[in-house]
Amino acid sequence: MYLTGHCACGALRYRFDPFDAVVDYCHCETCRRWSGAPVTAWAQVKPAQFEITRGAAKAFRSSPRATRHFCGDCGSPVYMTDPDGQSIGIMLGTVDDASSLVPQGHGWVSDQISWFKIDDQLPRWEEDAPYDG
Ligand SMILES: [Zn+2]
Ligand SMILES: [Zn+2]
């Protein structure tokens, strides 16, 4: 069963199969600046499980390992890809119903804003989660 999502203005829409999705928070500085939010949350799936159904994203190469895709009309950050095509990271805030996608950990807590208190027992990683190599 597919989940759907879209940017703030609706020009960019997608769907994805959430099977085996890896869901986590990222506190890194790049995600913070790109999203404008103190923390981001992501669902990662295989590229074959993700499909743009309307519009086209603009791209920003944020590092050699990551390209971030956003709506050129409203600016919403929507998804991230890697040059090896290993996974697509979907911004959880753009998913229409993300209630089944429960984060399983916190990445990059070394960049976490000091007043942001994590009130859960999930694993925390100083930098990348181990599966993000
Ligand atoms: Zn938009
Ligand atoms: Zn990040």
Image (cartoon, rainbow, N blue to C red):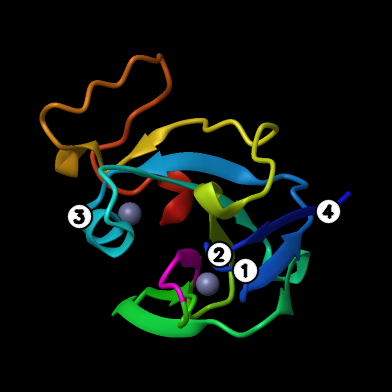
Pointer 1 residue: 10
- CA neighbours of label 1 inside 10 A, class few (<14), some (14 to 19), many (20+): some
Q: Are marks 4 and 2 in contact (CB under 8 Å)?
A: no
The amino acid at mark 2 is Cys
The yes-or-no answer for disc 3 within 8 Å of ligand 2 is yes
**What are the residue bounds of the magenta stretch?**
74-80
Q: Of the residues under marks 1 and 3, which one precedes in the sequence?
A: 1
Tag 2, which secondary structure?
Answer: loop
Q: Is residue 9 above or below residue 37?
A: below
Task: Give residue 29's mark.
Answer: 3
Q: Quadrant of residue 41?
A: top left
Q: Are marks 1 and 3 in contact (CB under 8 Å)?
A: no
The yes-or-no answer for disc 4 within 8 Å of ligand 1 is no
- CA neighbours of label 2 inside 10 A, class few (<14), some (14 to 19), many (20+): many
* Image quarter hosting the C terminus: bottom left
The yes-or-no answer for disc 1 within 8 Å of ligand 1 is yes
The amino acid at mark 1 is Gly
Pointer 2 residue: 7
Tag 1, which secondary structure?
Answer: loop
Q: CA distance from mark 3 to mark 4?
A: 31 Å
Pointer 4 residue: 2
Tell me: 6 left or right of 109: right
